[in-house]
């Protein structure tokens, strides 16, 4: 896997398989088919084709594509549900199981596998076990929590400031907001993350948030990161993401 001094990243996908392919096309036009692409997690939920997103990324990695995929908080829900339908993520402000939570997007994910989330348990769980390929659950379970490159550290939500990377807690890496988002400290590497949806990707000096809100119907962001800066890739070309703008 090449570690050239240009790399690409894609924000929270949330089941938007068509947008994912379009983002890859923008990257390929800018950097070629062998470009190193990092996906910062939240592959599933809310959008219409979570199954297609997993198929596309899993098959691409199996073919040897130069793609890294890190784990988001939403990527934990499906495999954990398959193991334990009553599991509740302790970080949720509204403590409900994935399939009964009104804001997580489980119904859309299950529908992409042909499962009606309105079914009662335990039938819903049985149908999900039947419909979701085992390799999809294993793929989500095996996603790394971060990827460190000479140009940046990629992680879904962020890091807890002042804590060594090896000592970071998984719940922080996939869920953290305020302590990380409010920090102006230099973290060492530039942190490229998603998780906190915005109207537009933004550069904050010590971090770049590339969650443009695809889970809420906005465009899926793709950026190029180089030693001299970060650019958003659009259909019309590059747009600089400048610190503080």
Image: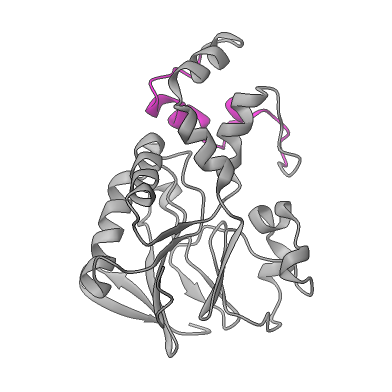
Q: Is residue 9 left or right of residue 162?
A: left
The x, y position of residue 162, in whole percent, is 79, 75
For residue 4, which quarter of the picture? bottom left
For residue 32, which quarter of the picture? bottom left
The x, y position of residue 160, in whole percent, is 74, 66
Q: Is residue 44 left or right of residue 35?
A: right
Against 185, is 72 above or below?
Answer: above
Nearest to the observer: residue 228 or residue 138: 138
For residue 66, which quarter of the picture? bottom left
Majority secondary structure of the magenta segment? Answer: loop
Q: Residue at x 55, y 9 (%)?
A: 123
Against 42, is 193 above or below?
Answer: below
Residue 201 visible to an observer of this rendering: yes
Nearest to the observer: residue 38 or residue 243: 38
Against 66, is 190 above or below?
Answer: below
The residues colored magenta run 93-118
Q: Residue at x 64, y 64 (%)?
A: 158
Nearest to the observer: residue 99 or residue 32: 32
Q: Is residue 110 magenta?
A: yes
Q: Residue at x 52, y 57 (%)?
A: 197
Q: Residue at x 61, y 11 (%)?
A: 121
Nearest to the observer: residue 63 or residue 221: 63
Question: What kind of colouring is applied to the model shown?
Answer: one colour
The x, y position of residue 223, in whole percent, is 38, 71
């Amino acid at each position: 896997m090449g570690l050239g001094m240009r790399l690409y990243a894609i924000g929270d996908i949330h089941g938007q398989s068509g947008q994912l392919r379009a983002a890859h096309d923008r990257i390929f036009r800018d950097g070629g088919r062998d470009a190193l692409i990092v996906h910062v997690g939240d592959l599933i939920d809310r959008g219409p084709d979570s199954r297609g997103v997993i198929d596309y990324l899993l098959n691409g990695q199996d073919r040897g594509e130069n793609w890294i995929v890190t784990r988001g908080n939403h990527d934990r829900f499906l495999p954990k549900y398959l193991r334990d339908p009553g599991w509740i993520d302790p970080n949720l402000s509204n403590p409900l199981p994935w399939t009964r939570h009104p804001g997580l997007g489980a119904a859309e994910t299950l529908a992409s596998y042909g499962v009606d989330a309105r079914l009662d348990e335990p039938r819903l769980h049985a149908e999900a076990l039947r419909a979701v390929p085992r390799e999809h659950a294993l793929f989500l379970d095996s996603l790394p929590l971060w990827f460190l490159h000479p140009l940046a550290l990629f992680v879904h939500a962020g890091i807890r400031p002042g804590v060594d990377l090896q000592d970071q807690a998984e719940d922080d890496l996939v869920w953290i907001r305020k302590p990380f988002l409010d920090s102006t400290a230099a973290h060492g590497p530039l942190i490229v993350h998603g998780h906190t949806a915005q109207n537009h990707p933004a550069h904050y000096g010590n971090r770049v948030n590339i969650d443009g809100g695809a889970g809420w119907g906005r465009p899926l962001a793709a950026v190029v990161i180089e030693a001299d800066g970060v650019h958003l890739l659009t259909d019309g070309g590059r747009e600089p993401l400048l610190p503080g703008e």
